[in-house]
Amino acid sequence: MRKICIDPVRCPLAHEKSRLKKYDHDCDGTWLEGIPDGNDHSIEAVRFAIMDDILRG
């Protein structure tokens, strides 16, 4: 699986949250390891929904 597509018409909130979520970086512009925690319940729901497909390969 290379790409996750969230329909902006059917799931506008999940689409907007996934579009705005990005990896954090420090003041020097170096990318940090993880995405910061926050209001990401819709992103977590998508992750749980596709976890079996990802693990199967």
Image: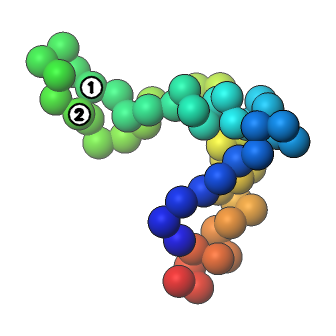
Quarter where residue 19 is shown: top right
Residue 4 in the image: state x and y as whole percent.
60, 56
In this orientation, which residue lies closer to the viewer: 38 or 57?
A: 57
Give the camera-side residue of 19 and 29: 19
Q: Is residue 47 left or right of residue 28?
A: right
| Disc 1 crowd, CA 10 A, few/some/many (<14, 14-19, 20+) | some
Viewer-proximal residue, 32 or 10? 10
Mark 2 and 1 residues: CB-CB less than 8 Å, in contact? yes
Q: CA distance from mark 2 to mark 1?
A: 4 Å
In which quadrant of the rendered view does residue 22 lie?
Answer: top left
Q: Secondary structure at mark 2?
A: loop
Q: Is residue 7 above or below residue 21?
A: below
Position of residue 23 relative to residue 26, above or below, is below
Q: Position of residue 23 (x, y in %)?
A: 38, 34
7 left or right, relative to 56: right
On the image, numbered disc 2 is attached to which residue? Answer: 31
Label 1 secondary element: loop
Instruction: Find disc 1 in the rendering and name its residue.
Output: 25
